[in-house]
Amino acid sequence: MNLAAQIKAEGEDCKLVILGKQAIDDDAGQTGPMLAGLLGWSQATAAFKVELKPDSVCVVSEVDGGLETVECSLPAVITCDLRLNEPRYATLPNIMKAKQKPLETKPADLEASLVGLQQLLQVEEPPKRKAGVMVGSVDELVSKLRDEAKVI
């Protein structure tokens, strides 16, 4: 059983999960769609406007051609764009108060598998590159590009 399903089975009754649009390390937006797939929930990505309804959520995303509006049934996973809201910065007194509050953690004995679903089949080095060729003139370069490489 995967970790998300195990936490869900432990009694967390949430209907909406909101995540960032993409990770900064690889610039890929995989976490939201993967979580939605693992949970079997609907998903909407790159939201910059969200309207919550009793049984659904309406999400507006900016796409190349303008705006796209999607309505998803709840429960759902949404990834948000940076324009979804304007962040409020915590004041020093509120930061100090937050340090005093208890932090609930899930027990480490969840019967969830953290083993990845991918399997490494083979690793090999790329082929060696051929040595380059020095050309003496522009005419020779153009000739090689036309006759040998056939790129012009």
Image (tube, grey):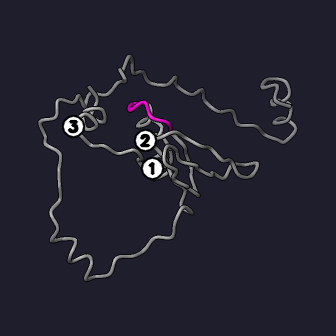
Q: In which quarter of the image is residue 102?
A: bottom left
Q: Is residue 121 above or below residue 111?
A: above
Image coords of residue 64 (percent x, y)? 73, 49
Q: Along the line of sight, which residue is nearer the eye, 116 or 142?
A: 116
Q: Residues within 10 Å of mark 3 (few under 14, many from 20)?
A: few
Image coords of residue 130 (percent x, y)? 60, 26
Q: Mark 1 points at which residue?
A: 23
Cα–Cα gap, marks 2 and 1: 8 Å
- Horizontal side of residue 123 vs 135, given as left or right: left
Cα–Cα gap, marks 3 and 2: 21 Å
Q: Is mark 3 in CB contact (under 8 Å) with mark 2?
A: no
Q: Name the residue under label 3.
A: 10
Image coords of residue 104 (percent x, y)? 17, 54
Q: Name the residue under label 2.
A: 31
1 or 3: tag closer to the N-terminus: 3
Residue 138 within the segment the image draws in magenta: no
- Horizontal side of residue 124 vs 105, given as left or right: right
2 or 1: tag closer to the N-terminus: 1
| Mark 3: secondary structure | loop
Q: Is mark 2 in CB contact (under 8 Å) with mark 1?
A: yes
